[in-house]
Image (cartoon, rainbow, N blue to C red):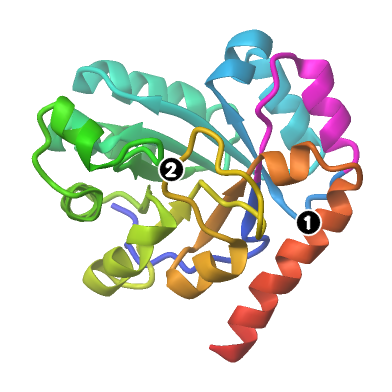
Amino acid sequence: MREQGAVALGPRVVVALDFADAASALALAGRLTPQSCRLKVGKELFTAAGPQLVATLAQRGFDIFLDLKFHDIPNTVAQACRAASQLGVWMLNVHALGGRAMLEAAREALEAMPHRPLLIAVTVLTSLEEAELREVGIEARPLDAALRLATLAHDSGLDGVVCSAHEAGRIRDALGEGFLRVTPGIRLAGEQAGDQKRIMTPRLAMESGSSYLVVGRPVTRAAEPLQILAQINDEIAAVENRA
């Protein structure tokens, strides 16, 4: 098993390529640089464009977070993780709610791979609040549910979790700085929340304990995406320089 405690290096911003086709994703990637960000390919884009797009983006020098949130029986998830790792991705994820056996199977499947990607687990989606959790049988606040699932992922040997920035600090304090906290729901000051309810600005997210920030609309819908990235990276640098 790889030793837990990976330190976050390189760009802290992961731009979510939430597009319905490869041409749009590649057009935006052409306006970005691997030095300023990493890229996230999620379910919509992967379904539309497939593995070839991931390979193309990686060939351009970008680190790719493959955000497919695998959640199935242990053997199926293990095989899916093994296939994903062969695409040369930097990071991939599973759902922590799949349970310990599934998490351990995913981790074990990657240990034999020559270029092992980081493996993280989704805790509580940022679109869910306490009322929605209760509807699906989780009688806990998002913070408590996220910490419980993060602890399970940590104990199963994973590298980190996807969580809201609101939970990142509690998870860091409980499980250590090296256990990564990848946080979506990042919005610039004054921006609309959209369908994500537990959101935070880049500066506050870093101050709250995030390791990586997943940023979508603020960059993908910007007239000058590199300019917005520079603004976000400046906020991150200011927080890190104070640490």
Percent position of residue 101, x then y = 14, 32
Q: Residue furthest top?
A: 48
- Which amino acid, mark 2? Lys
- Badge 1 or badge 2: first in the primary sequence: 2
Give the label, 1 or 2, closer to the camera: 2
Q: In the image, is residue 169 above or below residue 104?
A: below
At label 1, the amino acid type is Leu
| Residue 223, image quadrant | top right
- Discs 1, 2 touching: Cβ within 8 Å: no
Residue on which disc 2 sits:
197
Q: Which residues are magenta?
A: 15-31
Residue 96 in the figure: left or right of residue 207: left
Q: Residue at coordinates 49% horizontally, 75% vertically from top-left?
A: 207
Left or right: 102 in relation to 179: left
- Element marked by disc 1: helix
Q: Position of residue 10 (x, y in %)?
A: 66, 63
Q: Residue farthest to the bottom?
A: 242
Residue 90 rendering spot, x and y as whole percentages: 57, 43
Q: Is residue 113 visible?
A: no
Under circle 2, the secondary element is: loop
Name the residue rendered at 84%, 34% in the picture.
28
What's the distance in space between the residues labelled 1 and 2, CA to CA? Answer: 23 Å
Q: Nearer the viewer, residue 84 or 183?
A: 183
Please name the residue shown 58% across and 61% down the image. Answer: 201
Q: Which residue is mark 1?
A: 229
Residue 95 magenta-highlighted: no
* Above or below, comparing residue 104 to residue 209 in the picture: above
26 vs 170: above or below: above
